[in-house]
Image: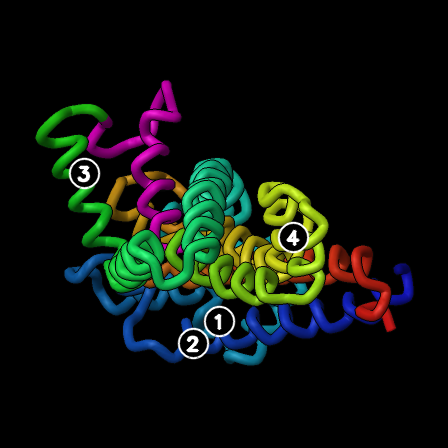
Amino acid sequence: MSRFLLRRLPQALIVLFGVVTLAFLMTHVVPGDPARLIAGPNASAATVASIHHELGLDRSLGYQYWTYLRQAVQGDLGTSYALQGTSVASAIGHALPVSAAVAVLGVLWEVLLGVPIGIIAAYRPRGLLDRATTFGSLIGLSAPPFWLGLLLLYALAYKSSVFPLSGYSNPYINYLILPSFTLGLGGAAWYARLTRTNMLEALRSPYVQTARAKGMPESVILLRHCLRNVLSPLLTMLGMDLGYFLGGVVVIESVFGLPGVGKLTFDAIGTLDIPMITGAVLFAALFIVVMNLLVDLAYAAIDPRVRR
């Protein structure tokens, strides 16, 4: 296992290095001047030049890139342009618990809704329930998250006042149910289709037919024999989804007004806050890489062939 981990760690570091490089270059290529945004439209050229010098934007791109990499390795992601005096790492760390809560609850909704629906649909293929499940999955996959979120806000927050409209305060769970459900509903459709496909394959396998011939109960066949075939692809999707969600879901957090990493990134894009954008992208990439690494390690622990 340790040898497998040593092989995977350099690959993860290369991915992070590539993501940081692309994010840094893209934020410097986009049109706009952060110093002008900070100074305001009526600021003099001298004021803008002074801000350029203070932020180090008057240095060459290569020097800025090297300085950023050197500081990032030490855990310093720079200081936000828009939130003056606030470090990027502290701002992301403050917003991270909100994104983490939404991510965990969103993944739970995906599993709790998608997996049972996929199992039920596979057990009676081409039946009425299977067709209804397939149709519902198509709707869940096609519905844009922002549209679904606004619809839920209108029905359950504005009209009926069951949930708060926006914000984030105590009790926090009231502010997390709708965003996490919106986030998990689209993913639940993927989980349902994936579970159905793998369950159908398992139900048609010879060892399931043998178990049925021996008189084994259907519940045992479904849970003990068939569901094992679904665990590997589900584990992959869980790791990817959790890493992606932890990095901040921009649309969901913006619609529901949650002060998470996604909302922080969205605001940083509007103000061309280069350190915040780059830091948020780095954090998102870090979570995705870490979750993929954990999934690979879980595969290696379950299946020795993966280690070889």
Question: Residue 99 lies in what quarter of the image?
Answer: top left
Residue 73 x %, y %: 69, 60
Residue 134 x %, y %: 32, 61
Which amino acid, mark 4?
Arg
| Element under disc 2 | helix
Q: Which residue is mark 3?
A: 153
Which amino acid, mark 1?
Ala
Q: Is residue 262 visible?
A: yes
Q: Which numbered marker is on residue 43?
A: none
Work out how far the residue at label 2 is from the one at label 3, CA to CA, in angstroms: 34 Å
- Report the mark closest to the observer, 4 or 1: 4
Q: In percent of the image, x 28 and y 48: which residue is there? A: 254
Q: In percent of the image, x 74 and y 60: which residue is there? A: 299
Q: Which residues are magenta?
A: 163-187
Question: Residue 273 lies in what quarter of the image?
Answer: bottom left
Question: Is mark 2 in CB contact (under 8 Å) with mark 3?
Answer: no
- Report the mark closest to the observer, 3 or 4: 4
- Report the mark closest to the observer, 4 or 2: 4
Q: In percent of the image, x 20 and y 24: which residue is there? A: 162
Please name whichever residue, 31 or 202, is drawn nearer the observer in this view of the structure: 202
Please name whichever residue, 83 or 174, is drawn nearer the observer in this view of the structure: 174
Q: Is residue 71 visible?
A: no
Q: Which residue is mark 1?
A: 23
Q: Which numbered marker is on residue 212?
A: 4
Please name whichever residue, 25 or 217, is drawn nearer the observer in this view of the structure: 217
Q: Earlier in the sequence, mark 2 or mark 3?
A: 2
Q: Which residue is mark 2?
A: 26
